[in-house]
Each structure stands twice: as structure tokens, then as C-alpha cells.
Amino acid sequence: MPAPSAISGRVVIVPTPIGNLGDITLRALEILKNADRIACEDTRHSAPLLAHHGISGKSLVSLHDHNEARRTPELVAAARAGETIALISDAGMPGISDPGFRLIQACIAADTPVEVLPGPSAVITALIGSGLPCHAFHFAGFLSVKTGKRRSALASALESNETNIFFESPHRIVSTLKILAELNPAARVCVARELTKKFETYHRGSAAEVLAHFQSHPPKGEIVLLVHAE
């Protein structure tokens, strides 16, 4: 472990709205306004959010899955030199199925301060809104595009006593619900769609019931799938 050193800079992990631009904290806005540079998953996506809140003139750098390993040393060095680096993803908490993990690891390894702000998360929002048990839950990120791997993941979810949470594409949700209905048609399911946006919906019921709904009403938008065996 590196010896502790006096570092005036830091990396701040800043959650951003998952849909509604008003869902950002005062503390997050303060950090974004005062940061020396803002690392964004996609600068084109983040620019409208910053403009909406009157934040301009900032140095924006991209930090995504394809360049995180290469860009991380540069950002750690800038923080160690005294800069405040704000990290944001396209939506929600950086690092949760989004870039950020490598940067955080590198900061810890280099004894560089990391500050994490609380804020929006599609995982927690969907869990609370689903009505499924929330005292114990498991988040597994995006389900595989491969049917066999999806079936295995869903079978494991149905064997647990926890609420299991996945991100899923609207193009695959019917296929995924078919698998669930085959494995356990009575399993409790919630499809949370377009959270915090104008057309937000929660569809709750058995796997068989939710499948029947989406077979006749093809879904659009971003989806969080929640499953509980009982």
C-alpha cells in the first residue's frame, strides 16, 4: 500500500438522474459547478444535463468502457496534482453497470481520495416500487444475450430467497419472461419501465401474467426486471 500523502485533489463519484432531470441533489450540483474537470461516460449525453442546470465552461473528458483503462492514470494524476475530478455516467450511480470501477480501484491503490455522493439509482428505485421483498436482494446487472446463460441466471434467481434484480432490453424481455414462465409460472415478477420518466410503468404479477401482458403490448424504453420465487 502506498504511504499516505497530503493530496488536495480528489475524485468525486456523482450520481445523475435516471430520467427526470430534476432528480439531482444540491450537493451534486455544487460538485459539478466547482470541479476542475468532469469525466463523462458520453460527453454528448451529459452536456444537456449540465446545460439544464446552468453548468458551463467545464473541461469534459470521456470515460467509457473502451477507454477507461487508458484514461484512468491521467485522471488519478490530475487528482494527485490537486484537481477535483467529478465522475458521472449517462444515468444513475457510476460503477453500477457503468464505467467507474477501474478509476475507483486505481484511486484507492494510489491513496488518492475518493468521495461518493448518494443519489439516483434505477436498482433501488425499481426495488422499492416493485412491492417485492426488499430486506434482502441481489443485483446481477444485464442479463446475457445468450438464451442458455439467461435461463441459468433466472433458474438461480428462482432458487434463492432474495428479490433478484436485472437490467434487460425491451427487445428481449418477452423472451426472458417466457423462460421465467416455463421455469415457474407462479413466480412473482415486476417489470419496471422508464423509471422517473413521463411514461413510467410498473407491471406486477406472476411470471405467466406479466408475460401475457407484454406479448400483447410490446414494451419500449429502459427496463428493470425483478423476480422473487414466492
Image: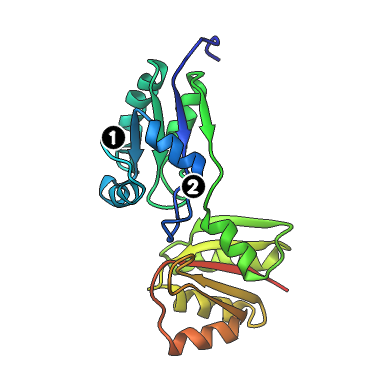
Q: Nearer the viewer, residue 37 or 222?
A: 37
Q: Name the N-terminal-most of marks 2 and 1.
A: 1
Which circle, 2 or 1, is nearer the viewer?
1
Give the x, y percent position of residue 70: 31, 31
Give the Cα separation between the discs numbered 2 and 1: 21 Å
Q: Would you place residue 227 above or below residue 19 in this image?
A: below
Taking the image as shown, residue 180 lies to the left or right of residue 57, namely right
**Residue neighbourhood size for the residue with mark 2, other residues' Cα within 10 Å, grouped as few (<14), some (14–19), many (≥20):** many
Q: Would you place residue 161 above or below residue 183 in this image?
A: above
- The residue that mark 2 highlights is 93
Which quadrant does the N terminus fall into? top right
- What colour scheme governs how the chains and residues are painted in the rendered image of this protein? rainbow
Q: Amino acid at mark 1?
A: Lys
Give the x, y percent position of residue 215: 45, 87
Residue 149 visible in image: no
Assign a secondary structure to mark 2: loop
- The residue that mark 1 highlights is 58
Q: Amino acid at mark 2?
A: Met
Q: Nearer the viewer, residue 122 or 17?
A: 17
Taking the image as shown, residue 200 lies to the left or right of residue 132, namely left
Q: Would you place residue 202 above or below residue 83 in this image?
A: below
Query: Do the numbered discs 2 and 1 sit on residues whose CB atoms are within 8 Å?
Result: no
